[in-house]
Amino acid sequence: MHVDGSDGRSTHHSGGPAAARKRLAWVFGLTLAYTAAEVIGGISSNSLALLADAGHMATDALALGLAVLAGWFATRPPDRGRTFGYQRAEILAALTNGIILVVVCGFIFWEAVHRFAAPPQVATGLMAWVAAGGLAVNLIAAWLLHGHTHGLNARAALLHVFGDLLGSLGTLVAAGLIARFGWRWADPAASIFIGGTIVFSSARLVLDSIHVLMEGTPSHLDTEAIRCSLVALKGVADVHDLHLWSLGGSSPLLTAHLVTDLTVRGHEVLRAATAELAATYGIDHVTLQIEPPDFNIHGIGRPPVDSGNTSP
């Protein structure tokens, strides 16, 4: 006996995925516009920290663009070729964004090392004004996204924005140190700080994306605890072949075989199991197979043959 608890599509997005995509689009526009301003300001002021922050914002614009596109693509309904739908598009976008950010940081670190040896002159006034503008833009972006992040794709977008916030702050501090004390090394030091922040968040994002693509158990769920909860149900003697994963990093799916002790009927076990999984663990997409105690799970699904029975 088998039951499937849902159609595999998440219905627990507070605020709605459409609203989240709209906010992502607004943040994408803001980030893209100010990226151009930071590139011009970085070149004019000769500030590597400002250019590093502009590079970060450029990759953020790409990340947000991918997030918007992947979010729209993930809403496409399942079809005959992809029965689970297209939710993994958001995970692929998150993984791509993380890898791009790590590569960009490599270039930032390389240039920063060379600038430590011979720090150039920096126009600190222009550097500070552009960084302050970037800080304001990122504060607005963070406000737009706060409370509207569902899954790795949206989380990646928010991480990009927080990284930009730190980058703008670091650039402002560097401008102040250069203007007050003449510490020109503060500019490449700030760029390394910005790059390090980006690498840290990007590495986590890449690892989380790979975890989802490898069908890993969602981090907020404990497989053994779920197994124990199922075994504790009336009429369940054992649980095996328990698998737990997610499509887009936020909506868990579960399959399992429940061995019954014949004290209750199969449909009663199904009702109890699906109710327990939904109420306690928030798992709505459930596929369960009910097996009697003498079910031959190693054969072809028939009860084992009694070797002492010679009747036809």
Image (cartoon, rainbow, N blue to C red):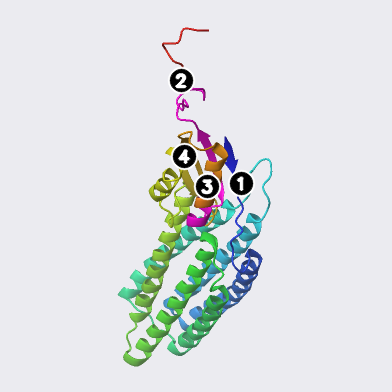
State the SS at label 4.
loop
The x, y position of residue 84, in whole percent, is: 61, 46
Q: What residue sits right under mark 3 in the picture?
A: 272
The x, y position of residue 19, in whole percent, is: 64, 69
> For mark 2, does the 10 Å Cα neighbourhood hold few (<14), some (14 to 19), or many (20 or more) residues?
few
As measured in the structure, the alpha-carbon distance from the residue carrying label 3 to the one carrying label 2 is 28 Å
Asked if residue 300 lies in the magenta stretch, the reply is yes
Left or right for 35, reference 261: right
- Which of the marked residues, 4 or 3, is nearer the chain's N terminus? 4
State the SS at label 1.
loop
- Eye-nearest disc, 1 or 3: 3
Q: Nearer the viewer, residue 53 or 67?
A: 67
**Residue ranking furthest to the bottom:** 180
Residues rendered magenta in the picture: 277-303
Disc 1 + disc 2, Cβ < 8 Å: no
Report the residue at 66% width, 41% height from top: 81
Left or right for 62, reference 109: right
Amino acid carrying mark 2 in the image = Pro
> For mark 1, does the 10 Å Cα neighbourhood hold few (<14), some (14 to 19), or many (20 or more) residues?
some
Relative to 250, residue 237 above or below: above
Q: What residue sits right under mark 1 in the picture?
A: 84
Report the residue at 59% width, 41% height from top: 3
The x, y position of residue 31, in whole percent, is: 57, 74
The x, y position of residue 242, in whole percent, is: 45, 41
Disc 4 + disc 2, Cβ < 8 Å: no
Disc 4 + disc 3, Cβ < 8 Å: yes
- Which of the marked residues, 1 or 2, is nearer the chain's N terminus? 1
As measured in the structure, the alpha-carbon distance from the residue carrying label 1 to the one carrying label 4 is 31 Å
